[in-house]
Image (cartoon, grey):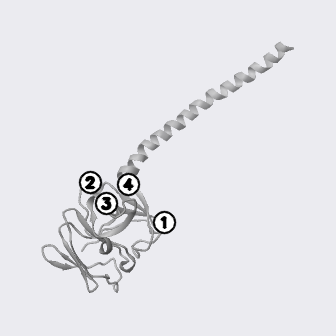
Amino acid sequence: MEENNEAKIKPQESKKGGVVKKFLPFVWEIVQMVVIALAIVLPIRYFLFQPFIVRGESMVPSFMPGDYLIVDELSYRFSNPERGNVIVFKYPKDTTQRFIKRIIGLPNETIEIKDGKVTIYNSGAVALLEEYLPDDLKTEGETKVVLGDDEYFVLGDNRSRSFDSRMWGTVPKGNIIGKAYLRIFPLNTLSQIPTPSY
């Protein structure tokens, strides 16, 4: 009787071993695919592009709360930020926070805000024409700032609701994470983000 029981058990054990042998290559294939995917995605995520969700109303009407953007982290390694670029950067007073604003003033320029207008002084004085803003919008406050070699002056498009360079000063180039490149959500607003011409 014992011999018969052993004979019945052995085929079952062999069946289990066969299933494991068939299953292991499948698991190994999945592991390989995950490793390859990570090898492709991680460098893109950490060195080339980064997602950013707009919080707050400081960039309305250009960007709404909840807009999902892709930030280009590569461009500024080869070229300097330009006036009008929308950038994501580390807030200089607390680098754990990420802000989104538009570059208004470039290094070594003087920026003056007075009577609701922004004036740029470099080789001469130029009142900034900002076509991306509503016609009746005025830039509140009065300030005059001389920018250093690697400093940028930034403002939110929603000037009356933006906490920006008027309150806390300039953004060092080293704090800039990248340029807002693409809006991918909501889907009906899917588009590349343009840089205005002045």
Q: Residue at x 42, y 61 (%)?
A: 52
Q: Amino acid at mark 1?
A: Leu
Q: Which residue is mark 4?
A: 49
Give the class, few, some or many, for how many residues have Cα within 10 Å of label 1's Cα (few <14, many ≥20). Answer: few
Q: Dots 1 and 4: beta carbons under 8 Å?
A: no
| Mark 4 or mark 3: whose residue is earlier in sequence | 4
Spatial CA span between label 2 and label 3: 11 Å
Q: Which residue is mark 1?
A: 187
Depth check, mark 3 against mark 1: the one in front is 3
Q: Dots 2 and 3: beta carbons under 8 Å?
A: no
| Mark 2 or mark 4: whose residue is earlier in sequence | 4
- In depth, the one of 96 and 134 nearer the eye is 96
Q: Dots 2 and 4: beta carbons under 8 Å?
A: no
Q: Secondary structure at mark 4?
A: strand
Q: Quadrant of the C terminus?
A: bottom left
Q: Residue at x 23, y 65 (%)?
A: 151
| Mark 3 or mark 1: whose residue is earlier in sequence | 3
Spatial CA span between label 1 and label 4: 19 Å
Q: Which residue is mark 2?
A: 77
Spatial CA span between label 2 and label 1: 30 Å
Q: Secondary structure at mark 2?
A: helix
Q: Residue 197, image x and y in percent?
A: 26, 72
- In depth, the one of 20 and 2 nearer the eye is 2
Q: Quadrant of the N terminus?
A: top right
Q: Secondary structure at mark 3?
A: strand
Q: Residue 58, image x and y in percent?
A: 40, 74
| Mark 2 or mark 3: whose residue is earlier in sequence | 2
